[in-house]
Amino acid sequence: MGGAQGKTRRGYARPLDLTRGRVDLTHGSGGRAMAQLVEELFARFLGNEYLGQGNDGAVLPAPMLEGRPGRLVLSTDCHVVSPLFFPGGDIGCLSVHGTLNDVAMMGATPLYLAAGFILEEGYALGDLARIVESMANAARAAGVPVVAGDTKVVERGKGDGVFITTTGVGVLPLGLELGGGRARPGDAVLVSGSIGDHGVAIMSKRENLTFDAPIESDTAALHGLVAAMLATCTDLRCLRDPTRGGLAATLNEIAAQSGVGMMLQERAIPLKPVVAAACELLGLDPLNVANEGKLIAICAPADAPRLLAAMRAHPLGQDAALIGVVIADDHHFVQLTTAFGGRRIVDWLAGDQLPRIC
Amino acid sequence: MKYIDEFRDGDLARNLAQNIVAAAEPGRTYSFMEFCGGHTHAISRYGLVDLLPRNLRMVHGPGCPVCVLPIGRIDMAIDLALTRGAILCTYADTLRVPASGGMSLMKARAGTGGSCADVRMVYSTRDALQVARDHPRREVVFFAIGFETTTPPTALAIQQAQSEGLSNFSVLCCHVLTPAAIRTILQSPETEQGPAVAIDGLIGPAHVSTVIGSRPYEFVAAEFHKPVVIAGFEPLDLMQAILMLVRQVNAGRAEVENEFSRAVSREGNLKAQARVAEVFELRREFEWRGLALVPHSALQIRAQYAAFDAERRFQLEYRFVPDNKACECGAILRGVKRPQDCAIFGSVCSPENPVGSCMVSSEGACAAHYGYGRYQDRH
Ligand code: SF4
């Protein structure tokens, strides 16, 4: 099926069995079973006036800013996390936060979401319901409805339970231009909080590790924080969420796009002790580990104190810190002064982050 | 976490650095080899070289299990998975090591000429045993690499497989021994592939010594009159070890000292050694990348466990394959060259497209220099 979900058809022989039922191929075949899945599971949690239209697409009003149609930001993100449920979240809320954050990093206010599900035959309907409910809660908390969706089912062994692709649309404030190519030597580099929480939460779950303090994913929607930052009217150059590849990858991207280098202070980078300890155990560098509720901001040097204060005043930016400066560097190296006073490069990671072998 | 913080204290490090600078005599040069790739990695990651005096040089050693695997050994693993139909279980670090004909385990896995190899990444020998249990009809081979720290778990896995009657499990044993490699380096300049570096002292890896103890290093002091300090992997451990080496050199001493007394004894872990001895025996010789054939430098599976020895089970023949001509891994592993001395470092050879093994493992000297230190090469 395509387009907006939520056709209302009544009178299925039996309601969906959310305790023992499983996804089967009929749930993706376009027949009654699929309609029932949409109605009793997706529409039940995600339902809203747009989904309720039941058409192939949602008809949306153009966002107006000061009487003129605003510029739109559109972003899409695929989510394939394993395990699907992890400390601090699940693929459902993650898929909402991930896309909202991509829209927010452009400086835009997110307005609508669309979601595509690829389900594996045999996946428990009860778990699917938990995922969709978590998605619905995240979307509601963010104030952004899921207005269109699609579901397909693949044969057992051809998927990993549930894959979710979400697309987000937002509207950009008048005159705002943010971008990875706008960093200039002298600019300040800020991060909104402790790094590595998400990746370490996932990996410790995968590896069955437990620690004294629980490690939870930081998955969160950041558009509220971004709004608070934009309200300070500082000369903001660039926002970006350091997801896959962590802080290291994101800063290298910006350095390359802007044709600059960076010099970071290891001591200034917020890192939870338990995350540092887990990284040690797993042989990971926290700078390469994924985050799902943090952002990097680059701004004009004079504005850094004001921006930092605004970030710290927001619940999702309490631990925000100034971690370094943009420098002129033809090699576009991101460098770090270590806690020991030595220097090193902070590089992209080659391949996947690997555990230590001896 | 406290535990880590204590060994990462920046002020303490600066203090130690000042002590090293004060202790190093200006008229002298000091050249110390950190044998182990873990130490190489820590030195680069914490930027320790910046804290050392100019007349003190750290030389990277061959203690990186992935780096020293010769191409011929990777070829054997690929052969098992690609043409013998076995499931090959391996640690992730070996996946990208270049093999013959532009192959690697990673490429074999993705597929070549219509067939693709079943190569699985494992985190431990336990995972490999589980794969064998889950696939009773398939041959499952564990690609065992590493120094003395990783040997006891492999021994245990073989015994476990035997007691469970897991007859589809076997091990491609590439375990190598630290002291033999050190001897080869110290016997400079006689290695078959060229001279090794002249060093004034050696930092020994603590995790190896938690198994074998400090005794196997005593020949370095006794026969070669070089000081050895066994050190942990925290940056402060390394700084302390360097200071201890400087003091030994200044005093003309050559002793085996133990910086890591919190976990290392002279005898090591006798239980683990006994288990290793039950399953493994010395190989007559083993080829190391960079060091050529080194006598008594590796382990093989004892006849009694022959059924679990992939080399016997599949009648594998080791075939020598020369390294890529441009690659300086051999010289780097002997300590005579540095990564930046390789003409294709950072251009043709990078972590994304490694030409030699030293660019693959995070413990390899080229990968460490590329990932952490290459800002130094600009001028
Ligand atoms: S840079 Fe590459 S080719 Fe050169 S020595 Fe290192 S691994 Fe070999």
Image (cartoon, coloured by chain):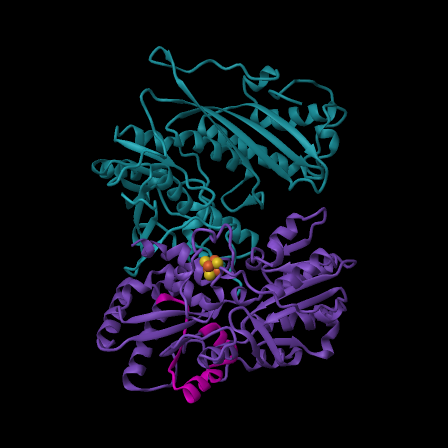
Chain colours: A cyan, B purple
Q: Is residue A228 left or right of residue B214?
A: left
Magenta extent? B206-235
Residue A111, by quadrant, is top left
Is residue A251 depicted above or below B3 in this figure? above
Looking at the image, which residue sits at the far bottom? Answer: B222
Q: Residue at x 57, y 65 (%)?
A: B322
Along the line of sight, which residue is nearer the eye, B284 or A134? B284
**Across the whole image, how many numbered discs are drawn on residues?**
0
Query: Majority secondary structure of the magenta segment?
Result: helix
Along the line of sight, which residue is nearer the eye, B97 or A238? B97
Q: Position of residue A21 (x, y in %)?
A: 72, 36
Q: Position of residue A144 (x, y in %)?
A: 47, 25
Looking at the image, which residue sits at the far top? Answer: A67
Looking at the image, which residue sits at the far front? Answer: B325
Image quadrant occupied by the N terminus of chain A: top right
Is residue B255 depicted above or below A41 in this figure? below
Looking at the image, which residue sits at the far right? Answer: B137
Q: Position of residue A352 (x, y in %)?
A: 52, 50
Q: Residue at x 64, y 33 (%)?
A: A118
Is residue A175 depicted above or below B202 in this figure? above
Q: Is residue B3 left or right of residue A8?
A: left
Q: Is residue A283 visible?
A: no
Q: Is residue A208 left or right of residue B236?
A: right
Along the line of sight, which residue is nearer the eye, B115 or A153? B115
Q: Is residue B207 magenta?
A: yes
Q: Position of residue B141 (x, y in %)?
A: 69, 63
Q: Is residue B221 magenta?
A: yes
Q: Is residue B327 visible?
A: yes
Residue B196, by quadrant, is bottom left
Along the line of sight, which residue is nearer the eye, A291 or B86? B86
Residue A257, by quadrant, is top left
